[in-house]
Amino acid sequence: MRGTLRLNESMAKHVSWRAGGQVAQAYVPADLEDLAAFLKALPQNESVLFVGLGSNLLVRDGGFRGTVILMHAVLNQVRVENERIYAEAGVASPKLARFSAKHDFEGAEFLAGIPGTIGGALAMNAGCYGAETWEVVDEVLTIDRHGELRHRQPADYQISYRHVALHAENPETNQEWFVAAWFKLARGDGALSQQRIKALLQKRIGAQPLNRPNAGSVFRNPPGDYAARLIEVCGLKGVRIGGAQVSEKHANFIVNLGDATAADIECLISRVQDTVRRERGVLLEREVRIVGDSVSGSGVNHGQ
């Protein structure tokens, strides 16, 4: 192996909430070939978690008993190939937006507002301001638990709001992770695209609590409504549990005031869900993923 193996790595360093427990081992691959070799060598019963910027993830305080693959700034190639843009999973979404504009492509500007990597954006069909990732995906490259690479098309997946899943009868085939994608964008005015990106970022700065560690939108918007509106009308803005707080700036954000534990954040998520369901009759679905064990050991390894 040519990558770096880290034992008992704190995941608080690798998630945007800056909270949470340790992982038994974390691997930083040297490149795609090295990643394939590492996965092939892992015991087949080992739990594996791929992490980019960790902007949609919470690892419980008891840690994750498995292997984390740290992708950000490793698989980070982006280039133009035959009028398509190729980007690897470790590329930050805003970087792809800027690259596209620089090369006179339009349609990827919204990616500047997504605080994660391309791998994460593909996995959850991330979107903002009326656009979603898979609307501009032409082809993807995946890697499975055995280190095998596959080219797949959008038609191979069930794709909906914040949801992406393979059409597959064999559950083992769902043990695939995105390692790259080819994006099909229209040619346009690069300067105009850069202006759109600037305007989008100004809007984001004005509406979101970017001065505190957070994971972006915590809940999916329910059909015909907005999670933030429901949370706000329930009077939950500013509510705290330990070091975690429902943002006073944007109600669908939970911020770390500096000393939040993963348990604080998870408890606050549950309180928001319980309150909105009781007062408004709506069950808010989490957009963030929670994995690992609680300190008492009552959590799960594979996430939920």
Image: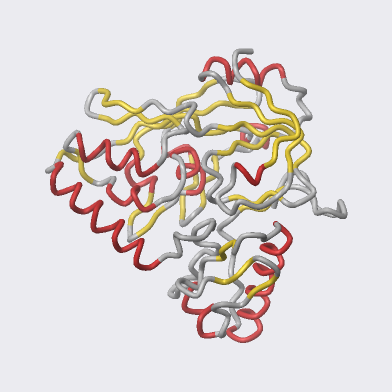
| Most foreground residue, 234 or 198 | 198
Name the spot of residue 226 as percent of width and height, x first: 45, 73
**On the rendered structure, is 292 left or right of 173?**
right
At 51% across and 60% down in the image, what residue appears?
212
The quadrant of the image that shows the N terminus is: top right
Q: What residue do we see at 44% from left, 49% from top? A: 115
Asked if residue 181 is positioned above or below residue 55 in the image, the reply reads: above
Residue under the point 67% across and 23% down = 5
Quadrant location of residue 27? Answer: top right
In the image shown, does 87 or 263 lie closer to the viewer?
263
Left or right, 111 with reference to 21: left
Residue 68's image quarter? top right
Query: Which residue, as the protein is rendered here, is positioned at the far front?
Result: 258
Considering depth in this image, is 158 or 251 the residue closer to the camera?
251
Q: Is residue 216 above or below residue 176?
A: below
Nearer-the-camera pick, 56 or 286: 56
Residue 93 location, x and y as percent? Answer: 39, 42
From what the image shows, is residue 60 above or below residue 151?
A: below
Is the image coloured rainbow, by chain, by secondary structure, or in one colour? secondary structure
Count of numbered tags: 0
Q: Residue at x 45, y 73 (%)?
A: 249
Spot occupied by residue 50 in the image (x, y as percentages of width and height) = 60, 36
Q: Quadrant of residue 181?
A: top left
- Residue 40 percent across, percent down from the top left: 67, 18
